[in-house]
């Protein structure tokens, strides 16, 4: 989280203030991402990944993962927490259900999202800057060419798992972080994110959403799935119309929804 937000109940959750090195006075009563070995100052570009890096370098829990202040893993119980007046946090998965899921799968990913009329590649090119995904592909081919088959397959798909959300046992978590962060460092070296306005400067965080899928597929990771829940309202009309404007009129996104 980068601002005050409701925190789910349960021992599984460790609130982390991302970008603490840049905004130390915003959230002073939770874990900061600028302690120990950290990349907190990269938060305007890496987004939630500064918390992921902090967990990798400074936390030795048996299971580690990432959710967002407004987007969390939800229970599989469809009826729990439903209703117009219900608190969205009531739909967040609790410790017991999460433990049951982890007993079956050492890795958990969010359920897929579908674009239908766009591929992963075309959607990115229409909504963001094409050179960002081009440089990412070039770096991936240079640093880990054995992953290119999965990357190219992903680019042609019309669905993927987003949000940089996952839960993994420590072995998988640390292996993924050791793979992805050097790749992101080289991508940002070749294409400095500070040349873009704030919204598009966050491209490393978006590219990493794709890279997580590539890593999972290439390594044949057996994972379980959980749905997600948003704790803040989404402007679906704005999101839908912006999606169509990007697709048919090449209008890049200018902000989140």
Image: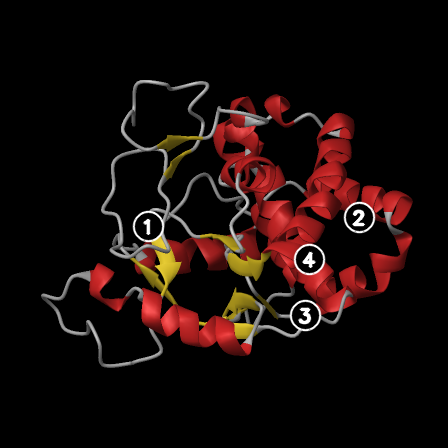
* Residue to which mark 1 is pinned: 70
Q: How far apart are the two marked residues, 4 and 1, measured between alpha carbons? A: 26 Å
Q: Quadrant of the N terminus?
A: top left
State the mark number for residue 157. 3
Q: Compute the Cα span from label 4 to label 2.
A: 11 Å
Q: Position of residue 197 (x, y in %)?
A: 52, 26
Disc 2 from disc 1: Cα separation: 30 Å
* Precedes in sequence: disc 4 or disc 3: 4
Q: Which residue does the image show at 75% across and 37% down from the upper left?
A: 182
Q: Which residue does the image show at 66% across and 56% down from the upper left? A: 171
Crowd class of label 3 (few under 14; some 14 to 19; many from 20; radius 10 Å): some
Question: Relative to the observer, which residue lies in front, 95 or 72?
Answer: 95
**Residue depth check, mark 1 versus mark 3: number of the one nearer the observer:** 1
- Most distant residue in the left direction: 85
Verify CB contact (< 8 Å) between mark 4 and mark 3.
no
Which numbered disc flags the more N-terminal residue, 4 or 1? 1
Residue to which mark 2 is pinned: 137
Res. 172 in view: yes
Q: Which dot, 4 or 2, sits closer to the camera?
A: 2
């Amino acid at each position: 989280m980068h601002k005050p937000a409701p925190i789910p109940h349960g021992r599984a959750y460790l609130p982390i203030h991302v970008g603490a090195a840049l905004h130390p006075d915003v959230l002073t009563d939770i874990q900061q991402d600028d302690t120990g070995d950290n990349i907190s100052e990269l938060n305007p570009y890496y987004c939630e990944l500064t918390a992921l890096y902090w967990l990798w370098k400074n936390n030795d829990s048996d299971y580690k993962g990432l959710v967002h202040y407004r987007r969390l893993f939800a229970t599989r119980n469809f009826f729990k927490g439903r209703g117009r007046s219900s608190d969205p946090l009531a739909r967040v998965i609790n410790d017991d259900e999460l433990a049951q899921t982890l007993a079956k799968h050492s890795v958990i990913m969010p359920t897929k999202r579908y674009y239908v009329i766009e591929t992963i590649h075309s959607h990115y090119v229409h909504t963001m800057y094409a050179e960002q995904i081009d440089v990412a592909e070039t770096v991936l081919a240079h640093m880990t060419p054995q992953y290119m088959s999965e990357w190219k397959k992903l680019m042609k798909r019309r669905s993927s798992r987003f949000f940089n959300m996952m839960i993994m046992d420590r072995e998988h978590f640390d292996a993924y972080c050791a793979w992805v962060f050097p790749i992101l460092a080289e991508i940002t070296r070749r294409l400095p994110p500070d040349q873009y306005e704030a919204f598009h400067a966050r491209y490393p965080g978006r590219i990493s959403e794709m890279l997580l899928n590539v890593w999972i597929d290439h390594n044949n990771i057996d994972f379980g799935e959980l749905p997600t829940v948003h704790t803040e309202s989404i402007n679906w009309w704005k999101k839908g119309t912006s999606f169509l404007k990007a697709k048919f009129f090449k209008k890049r996104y200018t902000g989140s929804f």
